[in-house]
Amino acid sequence: MAFALNSYPITYRAKFSGGKWAEEYLEKPHKTPEEEAAMSAEERGSLENSRNYYADMPLVNYTSQYGLACFEGLKALPQKDGGLAIFRPDRNAERFYKSMKGLYMPPFPEDYFLKACIETVKRNAGLGFRPHYKTEWEKDSFMSADSVYIRPFTLAEGGIGVNLSHEPYVMIITTPVSSYFSAGNSDAVVTERIRATPKGTGWIKACSNYVIAALAKHEAMDAGYMECVFLDATHRKYIEEGSSCNIFFCLKSGELVTPELGDTILPGITRSSIIELARDRGIQVSERKISIDEALEETKECFVSGTAAGATPIESLSYQGKKAVFNNGKVGEFTAEIRDTLKGIQYGKLPDTKGWMTRVI
């Protein structure tokens, strides 16, 4: 399934005007999940398509013309006890607030964000649009498990001419999602493209950041790789991120390294969670610069992290004719432990001692 544009029928919309946010929940055309599943592909496609259009919103705006927008990505996950819970939505609320503020938009209040995410998932679940826990997911460490992907995003008011958004919309849609990376190939390659520059928007979850990432990922996949890795813009030697995920290196010395945050690297919520889990285990975690040469020569295990990626192992990394294969191309012990712990907490198989899961139902 991965990502697909088959939104659940209930969407949240807020509009900033007159110094305040006006909220509403919109119910788009739908049948029951069972009835929709029984429809022909053409009929189902037409119905799903109708849920993705809003005739009362401006087509010409600072988002469609100049990419002035930001977004978030978080998940509601089916729990082993039958419930549904969202992973660390408070952190997404905080980052969304900072992203909007960084783009000089009126920031969306964090309490509004939390309530809207929970309520949107709950209302769709009440109509039957939600996944249910399957014990078979445990066999592959939940790598093929389903979840509800929650996508909050901004949309600027109507306008043309380079400008800021003073009266933005905030939308929240939800959609079913499964594994982000396809099974099999987990090789990565360093791209020549530059994702972000100092004093830019790399630290913001800005829509415009992902144009370069999409091009680089496409080029990597065309060359037979699963993922691409970016180097810094200034020195062209220090590793920064993957196409849409943070990256970790387990060194032969036992140190776990991830690139230090700055204005060119997104502060990932899965990233910070992994750092916390690793330190709980007594692992030396360093947030610092790591050069491509050090990564190729000293890495024992490598993995990328993110809402979609979880903790996904990278079996090799290639750069200018050099190729480093990690752990003989197999999932490393530490990578597997972190992945299994994180997924176990998210799906309710392991106790949530961190208080990371916000219950929906």
Image: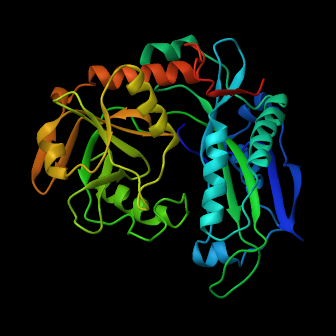
Q: Is residue 100 left or right of residue 157?
A: left
Q: Is residue 98 left or right of residue 203?
A: right
Between 36 and 77, the residue placed more toward the observer is 77
Of all residues, the one furthest to the bottom in this rendering is: 161
Q: Position of residue 328 (x, y in %)?
A: 15, 27
Q: Position of residue 326 (x, y in %)?
A: 18, 33
Between 269 and 306, the residue placed more toward the observer is 269
Q: Residue at x 61, y 71 (%)?
A: 68
Picture quadrant of residue 70: bottom right
Q: Is residue 5 visible?
A: no
Between 173 and 224, the residue placed more toward the observer is 173
Q: Position of residue 247 (x, y in %)?
A: 35, 43
Q: Position of residue 278 (x, y in %)?
A: 38, 26
Q: Residue at x 72, y 48 (%)?
A: 173
Q: Residue at x 65, y 64 (%)?
A: 101
Q: Is residue 211 visible?
A: yes
